[in-house]
Image (cartoon, rainbow, N blue to C red):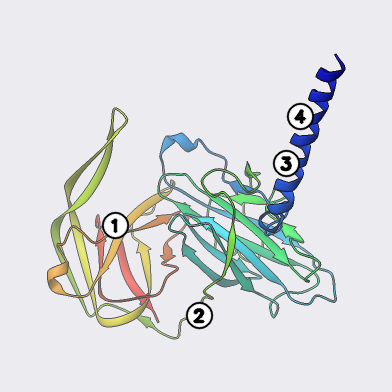
Amino acid sequence: MRRLTAAVIFVVLLTASFSYLWRLYATKFYDITGEASWIWAPHRINRNMPVAFFAARDFDLPPGRNWTRIKILGDPEYTLYFNGKRIGGRRSSDDRQLDVFDVSELARDRGNRMVVAVRSTNGVGGLIAAVDIKPEIENFIVTGPQWKIFQRWDDRLPLHDVGAPVPPMIIGEPPIGRWNFLTVRRGDPAVEAAALLTPRDVQHYRTDIPTIEIRDGVAVGGRKGVRATAFDFGPTRGRVRLTFTRGTGMPSVIYARTANAPEELTALEPPTMPFVFAPGEKMVIDPEERAFRYVIVYGGRGTAEVLQ
């Protein structure tokens, strides 16, 4: 009996030691976002429907800060606003890297506001963020139940609440799901547009685009004919801004892509970019800067311009 008791105690101690060592080893991963949780808009994820929402948090900061840095990842696409200014964003490409933005010049002791626009074509994704203010005070503000979710866009939303928010759906703290542990990278800051470029020519035509359908649980590739509009800007570089010409009361997706030569207008291979519009949104800006000549918009529901 004593041997059995000793064996049980040994197993318990061994398990506790292993757990302690594991958490000690993983501290550098956990400390990246502290108690921040992945959050999402409350909805049925298995519906495979597009989702666009705006997560907001108002907060104060203590004086004597060394800096104010926001660590953030919105999967699959996000745009960050802080105190009314667009800070940056990107399409995440299924990675596990937090973008770090230094917003020290915009931060103030009272009345800070962070708003994150998040978009997903199939309703699946996650948002996580944390604010650091000193080497010894990291994750001072984190994503969690205190945040508000707005499911309709209003141009005043980056500055203050507009409409009735709902509480977020809490997914959990890292490591969780396909994101696992997180690392950090320097975020690409948004640059204020100096010029708005309109197309010098517009061409309408019909073409095929690749499709993937789920049939009895199996992904089946195919193609379908759609209306396409090619907006010719000449060789240029900038961020594509799409205007939705047929807005609805539901999240909607417009697919587009860029091209550099006339022979690429009907090509099937280049991947398309989804632009997910929330109710009330008329314009969506691609968070990434690109070099191209044409912007091809499918479906006849949008027009393109370029921010330079």
Given this view, does label 1 or label 4 mark the residue nearer the observer? Answer: 4
Identify residue type, mark 4. Answer: Val
- The quadrant in which residue 71 appears is bottom right
The alpha-carbon separation of the residues under discs 2 and 4 comes to: 57 Å
For the point 60% across and 61% down, the residue is: 72
Q: Are marks 2 and 4 in contact (CB under 8 Å)?
A: no
Measure the C-alpha gap from mark 2 to mark 1. 28 Å
Tell me where residue 220 sits by quadrant: top left
CB-based contact (under 8 Å), mark 2 and mark 1: no
Of badges 2 and 3, the one in the foreground is 3
- Residue 97 percent location from the top left of the image: 54, 61
Q: Is residue 172 above or below residue 99?
A: above
- Residue 167 location in percent, x, y? 66, 44
Whole-number angstrom distance, CA of label 1 to CA of label 4: 64 Å
Q: Which mark is on residue 18? A: 3
Rounded to the nearest angstrom, the CA distance separating label 1 from label 3 is: 57 Å
Q: Quadrant of the N terminus?
A: top right
Query: Marks 2 and 4: which is nearer the front?
Result: 4
